[in-house]
Amino acid sequence: MRRTLLSILLATLTVTAAACSSEEPPTPAPATTTATSVDADQPAVTLPIDAMPTIPEGKAAQEPCPYLDSQFAADANGQRITGQGIDTRFDPPACVIWSYPDDPQLTIIVRHMNTPREAMDVVDWAAPVETTNPANDPVGWTGGRLGGDGHSVYAVAKDTTAVVVFSNQDQSVKPQLIAEQVIENLGL
């Protein structure tokens, strides 16, 4: 049985969830990768299309997202923030934000890919355009959105950039608001 979007997110973020799952692993994403590096002195890290952020400290992390105001994130998703961390393998860093539950309330991923097709592959991994509702905001961005069953996602791409926001809330408007703010803040 294919894992739901939430199962994929949880399995990727927590080793325990992956180890305890009796479900089959998801179908592998395309093998296309991209090289990213935050620090010019460090070698580039190659990340697969379906790369999820890893925060070793988990919920105990207290490193705010460099491109999203914490209060905006709390208000948009409707939950207080109790922990937040970044994964600098991504450029800009991917952000994970927690509330009181152990699972993240928000995961924000911005990917600068080599081609527009690779950017859309990131969107199709997170919110397959063929099986989700269309996402067309902000103007010029396209992708997919899905909500319900205790999670939602908003994933859009423009040119070679993809923005993906996962939320633990049912309404896809919540990750949409966050994605739009991230796009604005980063000048994408």
Image (cartoon, rainbow, N blue to C red):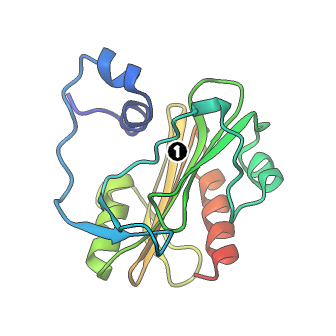
Residue 38 visible in this rendered orientation of the protein: yes
Q: Which amino acid does label 1 sit on?
A: Ser
At a point 39% along the width and 69% down the height, the residue shown is 36
**Where residue 7 sits in the image (x, y, percent)?**
38, 31
Q: Which of 36 and 98 is in front in this view?
A: 36
Q: Seen in the image, is 168 located left or right of residue 155? A: right
Say if residue 129 shows up in the picture: no
Q: Mark 1 points at which residue?
A: 152
Residue 125, x across and y down, in percent: 31, 55
In the picture, measured across the screen, residue 171 lies left or right of residue 89, that is right
Mark 1: secondary structure: strand
Say above or below: 61 vs 131: above
Residue at image x 23%, y 33%?
A: 2
Q: Quadrant of residue 173?
A: bottom right
The foreground one among 142 and 56 is 56
Position of residue 80 measured from the top left corner of the image (x, y, whole percent)? 79, 36
Q: Residues within 10 Å of mark 1 (few under 14, many from 20)?
A: many
